[in-house]
Amino acid sequence: MTKEKLEQELIQLGLNNLDSLESLLNDTLLTNEKFNLTAITDKERFRELMILDSLYPLKLIGFDNKKIIDIGTGAGYPGLPLALSSKGQFTLLDSTKKKIDHINKYVKSNNIKNVEGVVGRAEEYAVKHIEEFDIAISRAVAPLNVLLEIVLPLVKVGGYFIAMKGLKALDEIKLANRAFKELGCMVTNIDEFLLPESRERRYNILIKKIKPTNKKYPRLYSEIVHKPL
């Protein structure tokens, strides 16, 4: 995807921040030459698969003036593109310190005020941050029945979790039926789309938290994985 094509896609999303997103792209790929942040190193593919794909959740829900957490953010995706494109306050969480160090360095050097990178595991972070966030988001981290238990404790009642998924999304929703009931949440929207150039299929699943999460969740990660809800 060329810069010009990305700009056209941004306009369709109501955005005009091509320069800041190109700066993010260049910084990520430059840092990637020193240590591994992403397997996608071609700029044209990166624009579509990392930048544009990260922004499609904006079609589902407003992020302005919300408190948002990106679980398993990696190099900062989708959190950084979303933060550069909205007025939400973002916490970017990942267990890999060098990736969070990269994010915090980028945020500081570019005077970005609405992002904080945090090193940690979500199921441990949730213990001290129960129901703190309006929106949680996660991209390609774990199966949905595992992910729900990790993420939902962090979300306020009435808040939302956006699970960014690929081809197995609908199957994962079916397998997570018990988790939806046990954790007090429900699917309210599914945005199914094809990326414009690669034609890769994506599903962004909007999940609303409708009641408080039982305090016994989240369990230890080993329990969640071996006996998912």
Image (cartoon, rainbow, N blue to C red):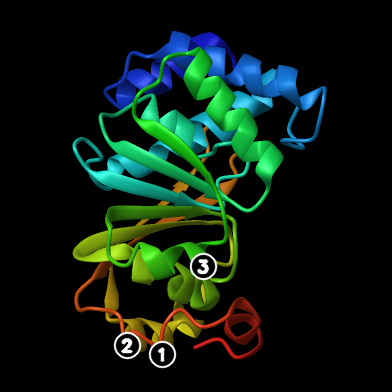
Where residue 68 sits in the image (x, y, percent)? Answer: 33, 47
> Three-letter amino acid code at disc 1?
Arg
Q: Earlier in the sequence, mark 2 or mark 3?
A: 3
Identify the secondary structure beneath mark 3. helix
Image quadrant assignment for residue 103: top right
Q: Which residue is mark 2?
A: 181
| Picture disc at residue 10 | none
Identify the secondary structure beneath mark 2. helix
Circle 1 crowding by C-alpha within 10 Å: few under 14, some 14–19, many from 20: some
Contact between marks 1 and 2 (CB within 8 A): the answer is yes
Q: Earlier in the sequence, mark 3 or mark 1?
A: 3
Mark 1–mark 2 Cα distance, whole angstroms, equals 5 Å
| Picture disc at residue 178 | 1
Where residue 138 sits in the image (x, y, percent)? Answer: 48, 54
In the rendered view, tell whether residue 167 sits above or below residue 183.
above
Where residue 15 sits in the image (x, y, percent)? Answer: 31, 20
> Three-letter amino acid code at disc 3?
Glu
> Three-letter amino acid code at disc 2?
Lys
Residues 87 and 21: in front is 87
Identify the secondary structure beneath mark 1. helix
Where residue 117 sits in the image (x, y, percent)? Answer: 50, 39
Q: Which residue is mark 3?
A: 124
Circle 2 crowding by C-alpha within 10 Å: few under 14, some 14–19, many from 20: few
- Identify the residue at horizontal 34%, vertical 29% (top origin): 114
Residue 122, can we see it?
yes
- Identify the residue at horizontal 41%, vertical 43% (top origin): 91
Q: Closer to the observer: label 3 or label 1?
A: 3
In the rendered view, tell whether residue 198 sits above or below residue 71.
above
Mark 2–mark 3 Cα distance, whole angstroms, equals 22 Å
Residue 188, can we see it?
no
Image quadrant assignment for residue 90: top left
Residues 208 and 104: in front is 104
